[in-house]
Image (spheres, rainbow, N blue to C red):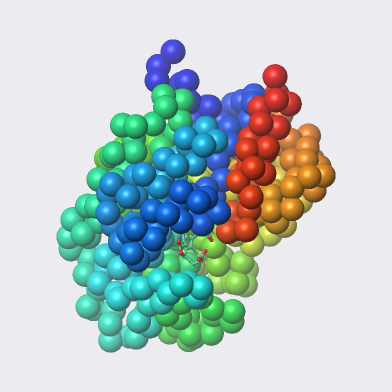
Amino acid sequence: MTEACSKPMLQALRGKSVSPAPVWLMRQAGRYLPEYRELRAKAGGFLDLCLTPEYAAEVTLQPIRRFGFDGAILFSDILVVPWALGRALRFEEGQGPVLEPLQSEDLRKLRQEGLTDRVAPVLEALDRVKTALPETTTMIGFAGAPWTVASYMIEGGASKEFLKVKSWALGRPEEFQTLIGILIDATVAYLSAQVAAGAEVLQIFDSWMGSLSETEAERWSLAPLSRIVEELKVRHPQVPIILFPRGAGLGYTHFAETSGADGLSLDTTVPLSFAKTLQKAVTVQGNLDPAALVVGGKALESGVERIMATLGQGPFIFNLGHGILPDTPPEHVQRLVNHLRREAS
Ligand code: CP3
């Protein structure tokens, strides 16, 4: 057996049904782990943590050591790309990311040349993790999708209504297309560099896709993501790609049929019977409610069992429907992993 074949996550992404189901969790490195909080305090700011290879590698490995997940997602953030394009970025305690809101006149100032040089610390962290991983663990690289990254750049942070970014997308679509085009190119370059540094799977997060109407979703989420997948497949045909169009609803079918992705990450609201139909075209990943992992007990067990009963026979990777919540007791994560592995044996 070659090294790649022995990795459960890669097998699942090649369309196989794997038992026990491979498992990793979005935001598996983070504040719910005491060892993360300790290192974060030592690093100073969150961005310092992301850009110090020794720390970023250590934080990536913490949940792998504790829980033996099948996938190790590089510890970084989707907002590293706008930062590398020259936008000011800071993370405020309790408030999340804060960016200087992008204006039309800033478009031509975005620094596209030399982007991969500026993310060198991220690539070095990835390289360090790769050499330290157990041989069955898959190295996952990631980036944000153009729509989600553009929304942070234009809104300047988290948003409820997305009115600034939608004013561009709906009111000045040609100009907005220029930004989306820049983000497509930057994302392809960034993810390609991650593959060169050792990433074996790529996941692209479109966390705010669900804010768009059908027509706008086609144009600003599905189309750019399909372009990115197409370009990456030319460069790295062997590297599976997972898309997370969170909130896509029935639109998940469209992603399964036309995006060219190998896997789709399903948010918590996706009905399992519908998810099963998607498995004919792609590997599905998901979709336990992160709150069930906080609550534990019966809520956790029944949630896991329902998912496994419906999706466990097809190509499947166990995950949450969104990132781990900071209040999650680490013991519940251990129980989840034990449960998945015990049930299968
Ligand atoms: O373990 C992993 O999953 C890898 C690391 C990772 C982080 N962010 C670390 C992080 C990944 C894959 C992300 C992706 C990300 N970042 C997304 C897409 C996924 C999603 O959740 O929808 C988005 C939208 C962001 C932007 C972002 N970064 C927000 C909104 C926040 C603040 C929210 C929060 O939880 O505080 C961040 C900060 C951030 N990124 C933290 C972590 C561990 C918390 C920072 C801290 O330690 O204070």
Q: Quadrant of residue 215?
A: bottom right
Residue for point 46% across, 56% down:
37
Q: How far across and how far down the image is residue 317, in percent? A: 60, 37
Residue for point 21% across, 69% down:
111
Residue for point 53% across, 27% down:
8
Tell which of 258 and 48 is nearer to you.
Answer: 48
Above or below 234: residue 249? below
Residue 303 appears left or right of 222: right
Tell which of 285 and 95 is nearer to you.
Answer: 95
Above or below 32: residue 102? below
Above or below 24: residue 267? below
Q: How far across and how far down the image is residue 99, in percent? A: 38, 77
Q: How far across and how far down the image is residue 270, in percent? A: 71, 53
Residue for point 71% across, 29% down:
313
Q: How far across and how far down the image is residue 279, in percent? A: 66, 38
Residue 340 appears left or right of 145: right
Can residue 105 be seen here? The reply is yes
Q: Quadrant of residue 180?
A: bottom left
Q: Quadrant of the N terminus?
A: top left
Q: Quadrant of residue 15?
A: top right
